[in-house]
Image: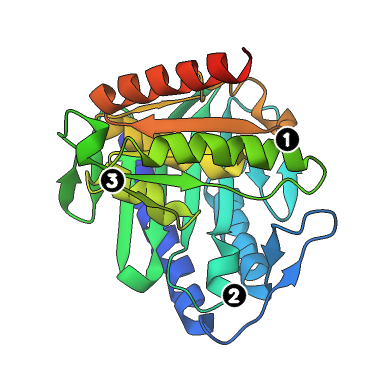
Amino acid sequence: MQESTYRDFITQLLASASAIVLDNFGKVSGTTKAGDPNQVLTVTDLRIGRLVIDEIKRRFPGHNIVDEETGVLHNGSPYTWVVDPIDGTSNFAAGVPLFGIMLGLLHANTPIAGGIALPVFDMICTAVKGEGAWCGTERIAVSTADRLRDSLVAYGIDSSPNNPYATKKECAFLGELVSRIRNLRSSNSAFDVVMVAQGKYGAFLNRTSKIWDIVAPHIIVEEAGGLYTTFDGKPIDYTEPTRKAGANFTVCAAAPILHRELQALLAFQEATQHD
């Protein structure tokens, strides 16, 4: 199959999932996942997950699947679909519209296609490697700002119940970051990365992400002209993705000029904290 044909499949599937989400928005409550007070689950997450997985199995029966809620299906394929039924479930369960549905596709260790739906905003953004990033019929691109001072920057942060020092250290960096940008934003959801791909935010950072949080945003930001790396500027390692459901990933996503400025700030902060 030509990679470009994945766009229609992703768009149609995200549209179907969005209809289900909107039908349940404001009508369901969430439960806290065992072992992680930052994570919330609703029956809608599970329903969306079933829909997406069933459609992938029907259309691409030999492909692997990594889903946040239902786990891993390993078929030995070089293709792996990575699914986040609702990214920002805490927002969704609280009736806050800043959440999304994310679906990404890896070929070996490279993101080649992906989509993010923001259902309340009636928006579906997609990207296919080499074909650009789109929201509906509009091609999108990252910010043209040439300095952080002129940019809104989003930062996703959760508490670290088992390591309070890590949270305090992260907040110290946030203090430095806020002094270098126009304003800080944080929905801690797919909404933030769509704003980066559309050029409305200059950057998005997160120290604690899972694989289902990053594959779809990765290809969309890259195809929108941005950089999507680890916190220290290295390529993200997707090797053997079906084995990485429990791995932690850091993300620094930004327009290229802003990414360089962020890397300098991150390196300075890291060196200062180790002095």
Q: Amino acid at mark 3?
A: Tyr
x, y (%) of residue 46? 67, 66
Callout 2–callout 1 Cβ contact below 8 Å: no
Q: Position of residue 240 (x, y in %)?
A: 67, 23
Kindly indicate the quadrant of the structure image that contains residue 180: top left
Earlier sequence position, callout 2 versus callout 3: 2
Question: Which residue is more in the foreground, 174 or 106?
Answer: 174
Q: Residues within 10 Å of mark 2 (few under 14, many from 20)?
A: many
Residue 129 picture quarter? top left
Q: Please name the residue that numbered disc 3 is placed on.
A: 201
Name which residue lies at 46% across and 45% down.
Answer: 155
Q: CA distance from mark 2 to mark 1?
A: 31 Å
Residue at (32% x, 22% y) in the render: 261
- The disc label shown at residue 74, or none: 1
Q: Residues within 10 Å of mark 3 (few under 14, many from 20)?
A: many
Which is nearer the eye, 57 or 252?
252
Provide the secondary structure element on which disc 2 rests. Answer: helix
**Mark 2 — residue?**
93
Image vertical order of residue 11 relative to residue 43, above or below: above
User: Disc 1 on helix, strand or loop?
Assistant: loop
Q: Amino acid at mark 2?
A: Ala
Q: Residue furthest bottom?
A: 27
Image quarter in which the N terminus is found:
top left
Residue positioned 67% across, 33% down in the render:
248
Q: Residues within 10 Å of mark 1 (few under 14, many from 20)?
A: some
Residue at 37% x, 73% y is 120
2 vs 1, front mark: 2
- Answer yes or no: is residue 4 visible: yes
Q: Amino acid at mark 1?
A: His
Residue 142's x, y, as percent? Answer: 23, 37
Q: Give the mark nearer the N terminus: 2 vs 1.
A: 1
Q: Are marks 2 and 3 in contact (CB under 8 Å)?
A: no
